[in-house]
Image (spheres, helix red, strand yellow):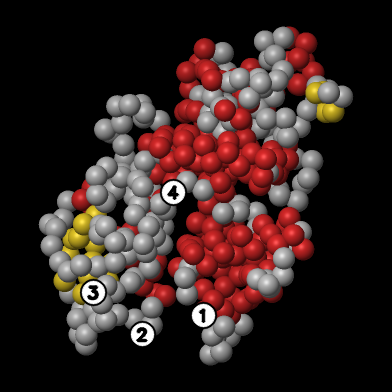
Amino acid sequence: DPIKSFGRHFARTIDMFALPAVIIQAGMEYDPERPAQDYTAEERRNHASWEALLRMIPNLAAMLMDANAQQPVTRISAALLSGGNAARSDDTRSVKIAVIEWLSDSLKQANVVLHPTDKNQRGFNNPVTGRLLCPIVLDYADESVRKLLETHQATIDGHPVNGSHWPNFAFDEHRYNPAMPWESFLRGRLIVQGFRHIFTSPSSAVVDEVNDGNRGTRTGNAAIHGMTKVTPGSIIYCATQVHFALSSAAIFNKNNKKNDTIIFYRSLVDFFEDSRLAAPVAELLEWWNRLVRPRPSPSESSLPMTGPRILMNPCHHLVPYSLPTTGDLRLLFSTTAFNKCMPLYKPSPPKLRTWYHLPLLRDCATPPLWGSGQPSHLAWRY
């Protein structure tokens, strides 16, 4: 189901815990003539998520209003929710295992062995994950601090330590400035590895950032969905997944408001939405877009380049450059997105006969930022 695929991408890039039914309802009830200040912060957030969903699925509004479909709102909401839940579950499981490899040197030096699935020894129960989860304003080298963290008695300014006290792993510790902590916030190595693991490929998370010629060839989630830039939601998603992987919590439940990972997640949402931090947030997003550059897969770059001029939108929806003629319709798509996108178009296209390989056009709606040189894509006709 292509809608489930969009649900996976929505959870990873927009809001990992939002209920699609709530987002759709908020979007359909939004009154553009009503002053923005009349809406609550949550209502504004839901409407922003709705607009992001429309950009992701341009024909969503028409699908929801389809009089010939049975309960389209319920069906589409359920599919989006199913996809989001599956993505979150898959990534939680894989990051929980991968983080052991990312920390292999530190674990070896500390003589710590972590089980891939049993989390009892994580969190503040060992010095490696304990130091990474320790709030950066505390000195983990102090034995008394370690003891207080282990027994959940540590406080900051009289308040118990929780996920809102940003941990060491969230920062580039080499650049941390206590006077301006946002300068290195959400630039931590583990978050970058988590992002590459989820959006590019698991193997790309463990290669050297400079000599990265041996990256895996599997097309990642960013390429599958035509992701053209890093979003606040994608950074929050990866940081939250890493936080949970490091913690000793066994269950990832968004309804547990006392769970440190959920508190950490909500603090990140507040960070990105704080208008006073607009400049640091813009700089952070620019930093991420410079850093993370997934390459097109070899399968997309090894075919001959020929064919007609074609436009593409960022979500890999099929867009004809000119009006199609009978029996000769040329459309653009990403190889890996082909099977996911085709079912959205009715009637189903006839059997594929001819393949073309095309360079990306300059008049593309939103030229992708990632990849070396001019990314190329596939086209087909029947």
- Indicate the quadrant containing the C terminus: top left, top right, bottom left or bottom right: bottom left
Alpha-carbon neighbours of circle 2 within 10 Å: few (<14), some, or many (≥20)? few
Q: Circle 4 is placed at which residue position?
A: 229
Q: Is residue 71 above or below residue 16?
A: below
Secondary structure found at label 3: loop
The answer to which image quadrant residue 380 occupies is bottom left
- Real-space Cα distance between discs 4 and 2? 32 Å
* Sooner in the amino-acid sequence: mark 1 or mark 4: 1
Residue 62, labelled with which disc?
Answer: 1
As drawn, the label of residue 347 is 2
For mark 4, give the secondary structure.
loop
Q: Position of residue 95 (x, y in %)?
A: 52, 39
Q: Position of residue 348 (x, y in %)?
A: 34, 81
Q: CA distance from mark 2 to mark 3?
A: 15 Å
Q: CA distance from mark 1 to mark 4?
A: 26 Å
Q: Tell me the amino acid under the disc marked 1.
A: Ala
